[in-house]
Amino acid sequence: MPWWLHVLNWLGSAVYVTALGMGIVAAFLGLPGTILILVGGLVFSAAHQWQEPPLALVLGLIPVAVVIELLDNLLSMTGVRNYGGSGATMTWVLIGGLGGAFLLGWLAPAFGLVGLIGGLAGVFIGALLPPLAGGLAGGYLAAYLYERHQGRLPDEARRAGWGALKGRILGALVRGLLTLGLAVLILLFSF
C-alpha cells in the first residue's frame, strides 16, 4: 500500500475517534450525540468493507440509541412531575430551554475567545457554557412562568422549575454515560 494511503487511513481514524468524542460531549450536554456516534460508526464501517465495526453491530445499536434518547426525555418529564409540574409544563421546559440556549448562544464566540487563556479546552468550554447555561435557565424559567400562569403559587411554580432543572441535568448525565458506553462498544470493534 502506498504511503499516502496509510496517511489517509490514519487521518480517517483520527476524524472517526474525534467524532465519537464529540458525540459523547454532545450527549452530556443534553444533545443527541448517539446519532453522531451511529453515523460515525456507519461511515467507518463502510470505509472498512463493513467489517470494522461490523455492520450488524452498528445496526443493532440503533434501538439502543433510541432507548437512550427516550430515557433522557422520560427522566426530564419525571423530574417535572415529581416536583408538582403538569404534563404541559414539560413542553414549555423544552421550548424555554431551546430559547434560552439560542438567546445566550450569541455569547459563545466571546466566551470562546476568553477561554483561549486556558488553551483549546478553554475555548471549547467557553463556547459551550453560554448556550448550556441559557438552556438550563430557560427551562427553569419556562416551567416557573407556565405554572404561575396556570394559577400556581410562587413556591409551587419554583418547585416545578426546580424539578425541570434537576430532571434535565439527570437526563443529560444518564444520556452521557450511556452514550459513552455506546461509543466504547463501537470503538472496541473498530480497531
Image (cartoon, rainbow, N blue to C red):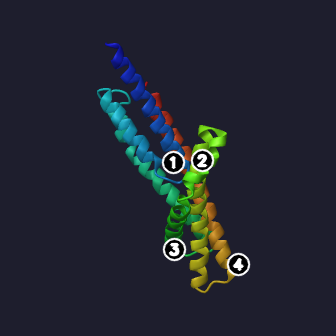
The residue that disc 1 covers is 26
The quarter of the picture where residue 155 lies is: bottom right
The answer to whether residue 64 of the structure is visible from this angle is: no
Residue 67, placed above or below residue 11: below
The residue that disc 3 covers is 87
- Of 95 and 103, the residue lying toward us: 103
The reply to whether dot 1 and dot 4 touch (C-beta < 8 Å) is: no
The reply to whether dot 1 and dot 3 touch (C-beta < 8 Å) is: no
Residue type indicated by callout 1: Ala
1 or 3: tag closer to the N-terminus:
1
Residue 48, placed above or below residue 39: above
3 or 2: tag closer to the N-terminus:
3
Label 2: how many Cα within 10 Å (few below 14, some 14–19, many 20+): some
**Residue pictured at 63% horizontal, 67% vertical:** 163
The reply to whether dot 3 and dot 2 touch (C-beta < 8 Å) is: no
The quarter of the picture where residue 186 lies is: top left
3 or 4: tag closer to the N-terminus:
3
Instruction: For mark 2, give the secondary structure.
Output: helix
113 relative position to 56: left or right: right
